Amino acid sequence: MPVTTLDSKTALVVIDLQNGVLAAPGSPHSARDVLARTVRLAEAFRARDLPVVLVRVTASTDGSDAVPGRTDLSRSARAWPAGWDAVVAELAGHPEDIVVTKRNWSAFYGTDLDLHLRRRGVTQIVLTGVATSIGVESTARAAHEHGYHVTLATDAMTDLDPEAHRHSVEKIFPRLGETGTTADILALLTATAS
């Protein structure tokens, strides 16, 4: 469903736009394009005193805080470069922003994201970030389950796999909320402010 409205208490929730994640290639949008569009949205939200939530993922180098469970993929300890989990400079440095640290795909599970949003009366979230089919989709699903209106800025997110991105955007997101471009959301922000 195309984006139709923004609630007066809408928050921008940015998933994993951090140094290590943005070093990976993105598809169908480059990580730099996703970042540029997200920065525009963050500036617009801040200008209207709407919350901006910067979600970052981290993990211990010894693997001790890895999510348990069997998968086909290795979960071995990894030597992460220093600063890999820091929010990128283009988004960081705004003391009014909320920073949430996660260790799972979803920004809700095991974090205080829901508490931050509810204390501010937030009823809707706009999602951007990386990766569309992992962190963004997991957070969108949880937001929907928590009763938030969900809006997804589909040109301000990307994935390692263009087919996974397409599947999330075309098959999953329409069941969870409304989708639109950065320009669509900025236009609604401007209309709401008038």
Image: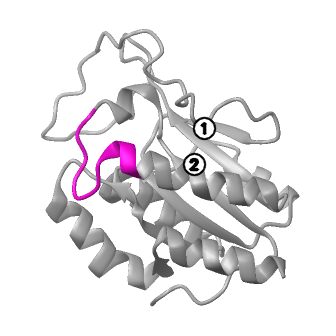
Q: Position of residue 61 (x, y in %)?
A: 38, 12
Q: Which mark is residue 39?
A: 2
The image shows residue 175, relative to residue 23, as above or below, that is below
Residue under the image location 26 percent in, 34 percent down = 24
Q: Position of residue 21 (x, y in %)?
A: 36, 33
Report crowding for label 2: few under 14, some 14 to 19, many 20 or more residues within 10 A (C-alpha): some
Q: Nearer the viewer, residue 6 or 183?
A: 183
| Residue named by callout 1 | 91
Magenta segment main secondary structure: loop
Residue under the image location 80 percent in, 57 percent down = 47
Residue under the image location 57 percent in, 34 percent down = 90
Q: Are marks 1 and 2 in contact (CB under 8 Å)?
A: yes
Q: Which residues are magenta?
A: 24-33
**Residue type, numbered disc 1:** Leu
Q: Of marks 1 and 2, which one's residue comes earlier in the chain?
A: 2
**Residue type, numbered disc 2:** Val
Q: Position of residue 33 (x, y in %)?
A: 38, 50
Q: Position of residue 63 (x, y in %)?
A: 36, 17
- Label 2: element kind: helix
